[in-house]
Image (cartoon, rainbow, N blue to C red):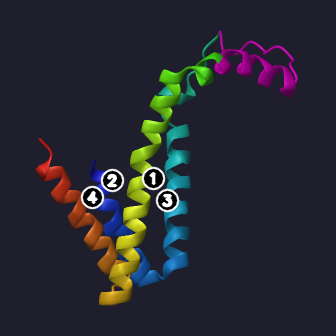
């Protein structure tokens, strides 16, 4: 949950102070450094003997065919289709809301990146506090 609170505020601050493009560059470099840090954790450096065996040589088509055999019954199940549709509803609704609010705030109030970030941080905080 804290990512939804801190992320917009930090992103808005970066965009306001360093420009829109540079804020994405800074975030990408930070994510890459975090990934490199994970590779140096003790747990990731241990080699599992069973994983060290060379895998069978298989073509991409064979892998896709095996995956499709397992996935096809799930995709044809009406219950699974309903769950997939339901899981897509919230992200689509939130994307539409976030885009409409940001465009409206920019157009009507002249909000910049920092104001938009603080607005979404406030929204996330209020949702977090109001959730039982």
Q: Is residue 81 above or below residue 96?
A: above
Q: Secondary structure at mark 4?
A: helix
First in sequence, mark 2 or 3: give its number: 2
Instruction: Pick the quarter of the image with the C terminus.
Output: top left
Residue corresponding to mark 2: 3
Q: Secondary structure at mark 3?
A: helix
Residue corresponding to mark 1: 92
Residue 1 percent coordinates (x, y): 28, 47
Image depth: mark 3 or mark 1 in front: 1
In the displayed structure image, the side of residue 113 where residue 45 appears, left or right:
right
Residue corresponding to mark 4: 5
- State the separation of the CA atoms marked 3 and 1: 27 Å
Q: Is residue 70 above or below residue 104?
A: above
Q: Residue at x 42, y 37 (%)?
A: 86
Image depth: mark 2 or mark 3 in front: 2
Q: Tell whether label 3 touches label 4 (CB within 8 Å).
A: no
Disc 1 residue crowd, few under 14, some 14–19, many 20+, Cα 10 Å: few
First in sequence, mark 4 or 3: give its number: 4
Specify the segment rendered in magenta.
50-72
């Amino acid at each position: 949950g804290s990512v939804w609170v801190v992320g917009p505020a930090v992103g808005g601050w970066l965009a306001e102070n360093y420009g829109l493009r540079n804020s994405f560059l800074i975030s990408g470099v930070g994510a890459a450094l975090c990934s490199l840090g994970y590779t140096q954790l003790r747990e990731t450096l241990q080699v599992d003997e069973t994983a060290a065996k060379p895998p069978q040589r298989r073509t991409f088509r064979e892998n896709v065919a095996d995956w499709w055999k397992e996935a096809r019954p799930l995709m044809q199940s009406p219950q699974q289709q309903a769950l997939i549709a339901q899981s897509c509803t919230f992200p689509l609704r939130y994307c539409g809301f976030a885009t409409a609010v940001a465009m409206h705030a920019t157009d009507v109030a002249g909000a910049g990146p920092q104001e938009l970030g603080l607005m979404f941080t406030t929204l996330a905080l209020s949702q977090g506090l109001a959730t039982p």
